[in-house]
Image: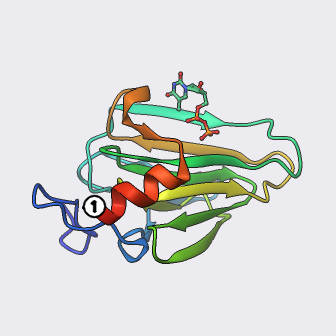
């Protein structure tokens, strides 16, 4: 694995920080007939990929997200179009605009995220480290703040 990757949170509960959520430069194989971006779990991104999903047909002005995860790591990619991801660790916020298919935003557990400003036709791809589990979500912002402050 690339030694420059941002770290996974470890068992000692390293506190999640928006500064650990970096935009990763993904491989891009370019030729005359177009580009390929291959993403291999544990090689091109810091975690193994257990689930893939994508969001599409978002109405203009719509906001999604509005939750954090307890154990899930994700890579968020704008495979088409653009959108903003607002990250919040309970203390600091930062907004990342994604608009290139060969860049992905790495998001650790205990980061509240909102997705907004979707361009027309945007497709948001998510590579996730775990299968879907509703118990892994924190959907209440006050509960998120309480939980992160206790870590
Ligand atoms: P959610 O993660 O809350 O979407 P967003 O943050 O983009 O607004 O998921 C919306 C609904 O879809 C929720 O009822 C759970 C369901 N869902 C699955 O069944 N499997 C999945 O892998 C995901 C991501 C969502």
Up-down relation of residue 131 to residue 89 (above or below): above
Badge 1 element? helix
Residue at the image point whose x is 14% and y is 58% from the top: 10
Quarter of the image that includes the C terminus: bottom left
Residue at the image point whose x is 51% and y is 67% from the top: 88
Up-down relation of residue 23 to residue 66 (above or below): below
Quarter of the image that includes the N terminus: bottom left
Along the line of sight, the residue nearer the viewer: 141 or 95: 141
| Picture coordinates of residue 143, whole percent (x, y) | 45, 50
| Picture coordinates of residue 53, whole percent (x, y) | 53, 33
Q: Is residue 37 visible?
A: no
Residue at the image point whose x is 53% and y is 61% from the top: 102
* Apparent side of residue 115 relative to residue 7 in the rendered image (left or right): right
Q: Is residue 150 visible?
A: yes
Query: Alpha-carbon neighbours of circle 1 within 10 Å: few (<14), some, or many (≥20)?
Result: few
* Apparent side of residue 75 relative to residue 58 in the rendered image (left or right): left
Kindly give the residue lying farthest to the left in the view shown. 12
* Apparent side of residue 63 relative to residue 65 in the rendered image (left or right): right
Q: Which residue is mark 1?
A: 150
């Amino acid at each position: 694995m690339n030694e420059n990757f941002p770290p996974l949170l470890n068992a000692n509960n390293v506190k999640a920080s928006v500064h650990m959520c970096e935009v990763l430069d993904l491989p891009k194989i370019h030729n005359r007939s177009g580009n390929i971006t291959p993403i291999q779990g544990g090689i091109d991104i810091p975690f193994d990929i257990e689930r893939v999903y994508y969001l599409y047909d978002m109405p203009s002005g719509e906001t999604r997200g509005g939750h954090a995860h307890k154990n899930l790591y994700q890579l968020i990619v704008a495979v088409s179009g653009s959108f903003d991801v607002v990250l919040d660790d309970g203390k600091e916020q930062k907004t990342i605009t994604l608009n290139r298919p060969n860049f992905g935003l790495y998001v650790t557990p205990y980061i509240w995220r909102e997705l907004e400003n979707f361009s027309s036709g945007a497709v948001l791809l998510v590579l996730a480290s775990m299968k879907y589990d509703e118990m892994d979500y924190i959907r209440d912002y006050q509960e998120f703040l309480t939980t992160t402050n206790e870590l």
